[in-house]
């Protein structure tokens, strides 16, 4: 991200053309969103444990539920999470800054809601076909239960779309909290539904592998699938309250001026094409993990281990990086809309520097403490399963900083309405991911194949950062490298002794994967906390001595609360 031929730009003050979010406001907004994400993750784990009690993990019922649940979640990942979340905010902010901007935003909400309802209806009617496409070779009883569940679960597509639309209007208005806290309501509703289900039908037996369709009555299917959809509906519709209380009056507007939504359509089209390439490449790479022979006597990491590692790896990114970038996304969009390039680059620089400070520590901590963390997050699993998952998590954790930077630069391109570049850059990213995964498969034993898939993803993110940064540098001519590069260098310097301190604890402690039972999981949790805190203290002290001010910006919401308590 360097541009030696240019001087670094001073960060613009509030006011003037566009407005930079102050460090205090940025920290507060990030903390609110991070806390919402944390509570959502915690209640989500409780919901998942209850679901395991209800349908199991490897039973026919579990597989039927998973297939039904994959349909709306895959569509959400493809459309809402992959496209709308990034494409809508710049367009909404641009609309709000026009004299009749609310009319345009009302039209975006109207058209988006109608499309979401239509998509939910079409895919629900196609439930039998979609289940059969995903569940080739299943017996009729299992297909019947999966199809019944799909009829109840697929309507989530509609509510995911509404949730995304309302949430991005709130984000554009800097009402960040509700969008991140709403999933907690979803989990609460789902937990209540699962509690009712378990109270009526009880836990599934461990050896209940096959499905008897006669036992899965319409009432049983409706309770399990219907309450899951009710949770997503609550997550979406609850956002109407802060939107209306914030002064936004909803109004139905289907038509408008010719061409006023042309740029949105173009951005979404290119972004959707990029996500499609990414999905195809991801599927091809994951076939390496699914090719691992899990029937062998020894445990080998396959696609299930990859899923578990990915679930753990994404937590720090979701808690802090995504929250930070969501807040910055709004201010970057405003700077671009007002033509303030200096302010926009200042926000890019700030985001890249905070990602460095947090990401370097998070990445190193996840690698050093991978054993205790995996033991806790996979508490019900036997030691061998935990042991083979740890290297996959460590491989993924190498990519936390590239992941954060990749998302930052991608969002800048969305601000610039340059989704075409996102699409073209996605092609070499996908090629690298697939090439690394299949390359490792060709030369390494099977136990390393899934690690190769993880390393391929890391390499793909690195390529994305390089190519997208070059695109931005060509666009702006400079990217404040004189301030970004020193922060990265100091962060790497500070983490070296921190890794040494954390490594001493790992060397002294028992091997985390071998810890079993409640006491073992609690011991692993204590070890993980000890490693994380020790590494952060060493890292933070050195950064403070090196004068890295971004550490203070990241911690300001916490330190202010501590001062109030005293």
Image (tube, rainbow, N blue to C red):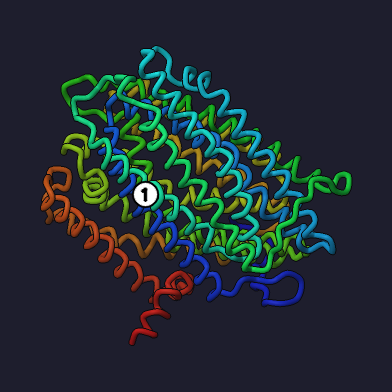
Quadrant of the rendered structure where residue 5 is? bottom right
Q: Is residue 70 above or below residue 414?
A: above
Quadrant of the frame with the C terminus: bottom left
Locate residue 305, reporting x and y percent.
30, 34
Q: Secondary structure at mark 1?
A: helix
- Seen from the viewer's position, the closer of residues 496 and 396 is 396
Left or right of 478: which side holds 441? left
Locate residue 176, reporting x and y percent.
56, 63
Locate residue 454, reporting x and y percent.
39, 36
Quadrant of the frame with the N terminus: bottom right
Q: Residue at x 26, y 52 (%)?
A: 369
Q: Residue at x 48, y 27 (%)?
A: 283
* Residue found farthest to the right: 258
Locate residue 118, reporting x and y percent.
66, 34
Left or right of 373: which side holds 180? right
Evaluate whether residue 47 shows in this view: yes
Q: Residue at x 29, y 62 (%)?
A: 498
Residue underneath mark 1: 44
Q: Is residue 485 above or below residue 138?
A: below
Left or right of 95: which side holds 247? left
- Seen from the viewer's position, the closer of residues 42 and 4 is 42
Q: Residue at x 12, y 43 (%)?
A: 514
Q: Is residue 504 above or below residue 453?
A: below
């Amino acid at each position: 991200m360097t541009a030696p031929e240019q001087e670094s730009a001073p960060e613009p003050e509030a006011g003037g053309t566009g407005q930079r979010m102050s460090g205090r406001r940025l920290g507060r907004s990030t903390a609110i969103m991070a806390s919402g994400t944390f509570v959502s993750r915690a209640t989500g784990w409780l919901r998942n444990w209850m679901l395991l009690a209800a349908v199991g993990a490897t039973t026919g019922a579990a597989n039927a539920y998973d297939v039904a649940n994959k349909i709306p979640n895959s569509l959400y990942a493809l459309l809402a999470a992959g496209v709308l979340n990034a494409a809508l905010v710049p367009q909404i902010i641009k609309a709000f800054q026009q004299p009749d901007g609310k009319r345009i935003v009302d039209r975006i909400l109207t058209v988006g809601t109608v499309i979401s309802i239509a998509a939910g209806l079409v895919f629900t009617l196609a439930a039998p076909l979609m289940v059969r496409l995903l569940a080739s070779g299943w017996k009729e009883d299992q297909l019947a239960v999966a199809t019944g569940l799909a009829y109840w679960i697929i309507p989530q597509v509609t509510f995911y779309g509404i949730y995304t639309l309302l949430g991005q209007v709130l984000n554009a208005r800097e009402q960040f909290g509700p969008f991140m806290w709403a999933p907690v309501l979803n989990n609460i509703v789902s937990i209540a539904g699962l509690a009712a289900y378990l109270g009526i039908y009880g836990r599934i037996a461990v050896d209940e592998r096959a499905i008897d369709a006669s036992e899965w009555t319409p009432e049983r299917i409706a309770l399990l699938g219907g309450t899951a959809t009710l949770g997503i509906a609550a997550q979406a519709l609850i956002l109407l309250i802060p939107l209306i209380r914030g002064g936004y009056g909803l109004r139905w507007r289907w038509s408008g001026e010719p061409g006023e939504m042309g740029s949105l359509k173009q951005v979404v089209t290119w972004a959707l094409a990029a996500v499609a390439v990414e999905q195809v490449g991801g599927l091809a790479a994951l076939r390496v993990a699914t090719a691992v022979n899990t029937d062998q006597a020894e445990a080998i990491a396959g696609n299930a281990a990859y899923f578990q590692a990915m679930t753990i790896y994404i937590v720090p990114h979701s808690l802090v990086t995504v929250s930070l970038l969501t807040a910055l996304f709004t201010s970057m969009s405003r700077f671009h809309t007002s033509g303030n390039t200096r302010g926009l680059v200042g926000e890019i620089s700030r985001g890249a520097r905070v990602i460095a400070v947090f990401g370097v520590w998070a990445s190193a901590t996840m690698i050093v403490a991978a054993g205790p963390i995996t033991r806790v997050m996979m508490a019900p699993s036997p030691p061998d399963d935990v042991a083979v998952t740890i290297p996959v998590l460590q491989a993924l954790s190498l990519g936390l900083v590239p992941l954060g930077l990749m998302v930052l630069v991608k969002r800048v391109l969305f601000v610039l309405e340059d989704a075409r570049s996102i699409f073209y850059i996605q092609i070499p990213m996908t090629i690298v991911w697939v090439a690394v995964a299949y390359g490792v498969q060709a030369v390494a034993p099977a136990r390393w194949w899934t690690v190769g898939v993880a390393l391929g993803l890391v390499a793909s993110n690195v390529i994305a950062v390089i190519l997208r940064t070059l695109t931005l540098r060509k666009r702006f001519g400079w990217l404040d490298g004189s301030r970004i590069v020193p922060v990265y260098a100091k962060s790497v310097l500070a983490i070296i002794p921190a890794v040494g301190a954390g490594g001493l604890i790992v060397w002294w402690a028992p091997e985390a994967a071998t810890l079993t039972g409640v006491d073992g999981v609690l011991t692993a949790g204590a070890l993980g906390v000890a490693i994380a805190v020790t590494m952060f203290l060493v890292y933070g002290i050195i950064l403070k001595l090196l004068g890295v001010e971004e550490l203070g910006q990241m911690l300001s919401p916490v330190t202010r609360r501590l001062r109030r308590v005293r």
